[in-house]
Amino acid sequence: MIISTEKKSDFENRINEFISEFPYLSPPYNSRNYGHRWHSLCSYHGKLKPGIANRLIAAFTNVGDVVLDPMSGVGTIPFEACLQGRIGIGNDMSELAFAVTKAKVDKPPLSEVMSVLGELEIFINSFKQTYTDSDVPYKDFGLNKVIPEYFHEETYSELLAARLYFSQLGNGKLNNTEAMVLSCLLHVLHGNRPYALSRNSHPLTPYAPTGEFVYKNVIQHIRNKINLAYNKGEFEHYINGKAIFGNMFDLGEKISDVDVIITSPPFVDSIKFYSMNWMRLWFAGWEPEDFKKAESIFIEGQQKQSLEVYRPFFKMCNTVLKNGGRVIMHLGKSVKVDMAEELSHISSEYFETIAIGNEDVSKVEKHGIRDKGGTIAHQFLFLEKK
């Protein structure tokens, strides 16, 4: 199918309006807390803000469209698609990301979530153990401090039992109710407020803990988070979507007839998601050796050698998209690498580049720090299937 000149012109007009105004920079979309409260279902160190996802979905998709994010992180894009009456599909090969995306895009009934929480409570009471200093698990593992340093010994015992419970369910195989309970647990795992199970730390990156070791009941803290989540946010236009666990290059074997792909891959010369989110990744199933292998397995590390690793990505996009389908990528430009320009060339076998937009962030500060990593511009690459 050939896109009509009229439709293509409309697409280009919407792009021009978007990259001339960057609407997510204006109120209310620029607010730190903008968007549905489930965007914060589980804290996660990432780059894409809900306001950006909201404006991209509104501008470049239609109600009923199938919207895919092959590198979904914690599901910001597919969840926003579901909220706006689209069918959001999120894929990721991180157990943490899959669980949180699953909970968001396949909204489970509260009663069923509480039932799973009851099963978890029984399991914890049956399998929690008392450890001595010499046999406490993961006493030598942690990226800032070792894990046992973050928790009261009784809380830690309950957490280890809970981790065993979810591991037995199978990585990437959680149903929506199990994913919701795990997501809420992961959110309260560490932080600097009373909701957190840890000693005083940080809600995003678990910096070295401080303060007293105070016992906190795991089940009660999860229950509080679940109740808070279900008391917040509107779902008037929400449509259930889908979460997929696996390598994005394999998506051509799993889905088809996608209308639009919107994604925000890791920025070159930016933060490492697996070090910033290390404790939640550990709880979701990672072992110490997995952190050593992450650089070679995840595209974040692979792209350091060459952006040619995206060539099979664009082949997959071409396979799953409908004729005339579109790809929109939220990227990061560094002093050394212009991601949008390079990916535009790499994608040319399957896609026509319609436009590239650049937002200068070289002087942007957040919490007194310049944009994290070496990013000097946020970019938007707009592609159309040939």
Image (cartoon, rainbow, N blue to C red):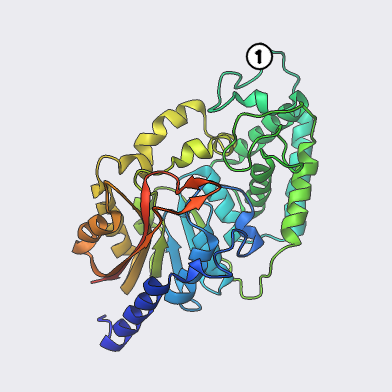
Residue 46 place in picture, x, y as percent? 49, 49
Report the residue that reaches farthest toward the top.
Answer: 134
Task: Quarter of the image for the N terminus: give it.
Answer: bottom left
Residue 321 place in picture, x, y as percent? 34, 68
Residue 212: which quarter of the image?
top right
Residue 172 place in picture, x, y as percent? 53, 45
| Amino acid at dot 1 | Asp
- Categorize mark 1 by other alpha carbons within 10 Å: few (<14), some (14-19), many (20+): few
Q: Is residue 68 visible?
A: yes
Q: Is residue 56 above or below residue 10?
A: above
Q: Is residue 152 left or right of residue 306?
A: right
Say which element carries label 1.
Answer: loop
Q: Is residue 42 left or right of residue 287?
A: right
Q: Residue at x 77, y 30 (%)?
A: 126
Q: Is residue 88 visible?
A: no
* Residue located beneath label 1 in the image: 135
Residue 217 place in picture, x, y as percent? 80, 36
Q: Residue at x 29, y 54 (%)?
A: 339
